Image (cartoon, grey):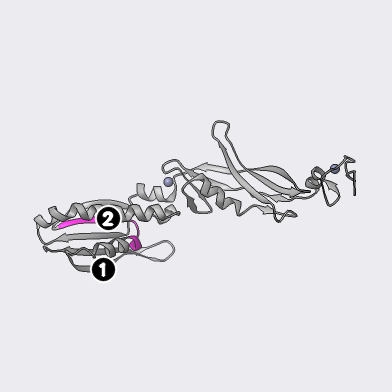
Amino acid sequence: MQRFCPKCGKDIEENIDGFCIDCYLEDHEILTIPVFDIYYCSVCESYTYANKIYKNKQLLEKELLKHIKLKHLEDAKPSLQIVIDDQKKEYFSEVTVRFLINNKIKKIKQTQKTNYKKEICVACSRVAGNYYTSIIQLRFDNKNLQEQILPSIRKRIQKIVHDYNKKQKDLKNQINIVKEKTEKGGVDIYINEQSHAQRIVQNLSKNKNAYDQKYSKTLMGVHKNGKKKFRYTFCIHYKDD
Ligand SMILES: [Zn+2]
Ligand SMILES: [Zn+2]
C-alpha cells in the first residue's frame, strides 16, 4: 500500500488512484459548473432560467443541479446552492460534492459565478400589459337571476383559478383573469389563454342553470412569426330553475 503521494510527497491516508486527494483534484476536473444566466422577478419573487420560470429558489436550484457535470466520481452526490448577495453584488453558484473514500466521507466545494439580473418575468409583464386572448361571456335571462347566482359563479371561477395555479410549477402556464366587465345581460371575463378559458367554461357549464353554450373565434391579426392571432369567445347562458 502506498504511503506517499507521488506528486507532493505528502503522507497519505486516503488516496484516489495513488494520489492524495488534493493532488488528484488539482489534476482532474471532476466538477464542471456552468455559468448560469438567472433572472429574478421582484414582483412575484420568481426566478427565470432558460426561459422557464421557477416559483422559488429551491425549485431553481433543483433544476440547475441537473446541469452539473461530475467526472471520475460517478456515484457522488452533489448539492447546489445559489448565493445571492445584493449588498456585495456577489452572485454565484456553490456546489458541494460528498463522496466516500476508504469509508470516510470527503467533501469538496466549488463555486462558479452566476449572471444574475433583475427583470420582470413574462407572467408579470403579461399581467401588467393586460394580456388576454379569451373572453368568457356570462349571460343571464333576467337581472334577478344574475344577482342571485353571479356571486357564486365568481367564487367558483376563483376556486378553479386558485386550484389550478397552485398545482402549476411553471408560472407561464398560470391562469390569469385580467378583468371583468359589465355588459348588457351579464358580464365578460377576460382571460390570458384560450385553454384556461375552456377549462373554466367546462366547469361552469355543469351548473344546473346553464342551458346554452357558444364558442367563436375572431381573427385579430398575425403574429411576428406568421402565426394567426385569434380572440376566443365563450358564451354561457343561464336561465331560471
Ligand atoms: Zn499530493
Ligand atoms: Zn414575476
The quarter of the picture showing ligand 1: top right
In this rendering, position of residue 47 left or right of residue 126:
right
Q: Quadrant of the C terminus?
A: bottom left
The answer as to whether callout 2 falls within 8 Å of ligand 2 is no
Counting residues from the start of the chain, the first of labels 2 and 1 encountered is 2
> Residue sitting at 69 percent across and 47 percent down?
98
Q: CA distance from mark 2 to mark 1?
A: 21 Å
Q: Is residue 92 above or below residue 155?
A: above
Q: Residues within 10 Å of mark 2 (few under 14, many from 20)?
A: some
Residue 176, visible in the rendered structure: no
At label 1, counting other C-alpha atoms closer than 10 Å, the crowd grade (few under 14, some 14-19, many 20 or more) is few
Query: Does the image show residue 157?
Result: yes
Of 102 and 74, the residue lying toward us: 102
111 on left or right of 206: right
- Whole-percent x, y for residue 101 in the image: 77, 48
Instruction: Return the mark for residue 157.
Output: 2
Residue at 22% from the left image edge and 68% from the top image edge: 214
Of the numbered discs in the image, which one, if any, rests on residue 216? Answer: 1
Q: Secondary structure at mark 2?
A: helix
Percent position of residue 200, x then y = 29, 60
Under mark 1, the amino acid is Ser
Is 227 located above or below residue 154 in the figure?
below
The magenta stretch is: 186-196
- Specify the label residue 74 is tagged with: none
Q: Report the mark closest to the observer, 2 or 1.
A: 2
Horizontally, residue 230 falls left or right of residue 207, namely right
Q: Is disc 1 placed on a helix, strand or loop? A: strand
